[in-house]
Image: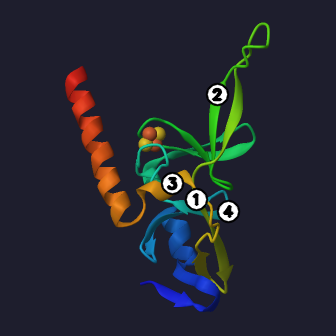
Amino acid sequence: MEKEQPGGLHFVGKKDELIEAKRSFRTLEGRDILIIYHQTVFYAMDSYCYHAGGALENGDIEEIADKLCIICPKHKYKISLADGEGIYKGTDPREKPPVPRWYSKGVKQRIHTVTETNGDVYVKLSEDTCWIESDFYQGEKGKVERAKAAAAEKKLSSVND
Ligand code: FES
């Protein structure tokens, strides 16, 4: 299904189909991407969570601190849809008394650009050359790392049973 257009645009589907699906998984240039349609906007991000490679596809979406975030089903990490920021709740011990607030860990999940032309939707992969944590779980090496993370999780849950 992948068709690459000039300018690095990948055709990922018809707008109507992607809207109906709400979440769509695509592999572009060997990279696994999740395309999300939420409240009239398309988003695209690496499909495995930066924390331990959890599949974000079935994560709920909530608004947190004025940002729409996907919640990873595995350990509930929150990732902003627009920027890929890791969002967490913490307290500043210097505050008396400390009040829990939402903070950003910075960009943790690689975000890609979605465009639409005449009902066709395209994704352009991020060209940001700096390391973004979700890169760890992409490609062939990422597949191995995801399997390792899943095995470690399984071992942990059998110890806790
Ligand atoms: S793998 Fe996503 S929160 Fe741990």
Q: Is residue 2 above or below residue 86?
A: below
Task: Using the numbered discs, state the Cα–Cα distance from disc 1 to disc 2 in whole angstroms.
Answer: 21 Å
Q: Mark 4 points at which residue?
A: 40
Q: Observer-nearest residue: 47 or 22?
A: 47
Q: Which of marks 4 and 3 is nearer the N terminus?
A: 4
Of discs 4 and 3, which sits in the foreground?
3
From the viewer's perspective, is 145 left or right of 99?
left
Q: Do the residues labelled 3 and 1 touch (CB within 8 Å)?
A: yes
Q: Mark 2 points at which residue?
A: 89
Residue at left offset 63%, top offset 52%: 84
Of discs 4 and 2, which sits in the foreground?
2
Task: Using the numbered discs, state the Cα–Cα distance from disc 4 to disc 2 in whole angstroms.
Answer: 28 Å
Q: In which quarter of the image is the N terminus?
A: bottom left
The image shows residue 158 at horizontal and vertical percentages of 20, 28
Of discs 1 and 2, which sits in the foreground?
1
Residue at left offset 56%, top offset 68%: 19
Q: Which of marks 1 and 4 is nearer the N terminus?
A: 4
Amino acid marked by disc 1: Arg
Amino acid marked by disc 3: Ser
Task: Using the numbered discs, state the Cα–Cα distance from disc 3 to disc 1 in whole angstroms.
Answer: 6 Å
Amino acid marked by disc 4: Thr
Task: Using the numbered discs, state the Cα–Cα distance from disc 3 to disc 2 in whole angstroms.
Answer: 20 Å
Q: Name the residue under label 3.
A: 134
Q: Mark 1 points at which residue?
A: 110
- Secondary structure of the residue carrying tag 4 is loop
Q: Are marks 1 and 2 in contact (CB under 8 Å)?
A: no
Task: Using the numbered discs, state the Cα–Cα distance from disc 1 to disc 4 in whole angstroms.
Answer: 21 Å
- Secondary structure of the residue carrying tag 1 is loop
Of discs 1 and 4, which sits in the foreground?
1
Q: Earlier in the sequence, mark 3 or mark 2?
A: 2
Q: Earlier in the sequence, mark 3 or mark 1?
A: 1
Q: In this view, does 129 lie above or below 101?
A: below
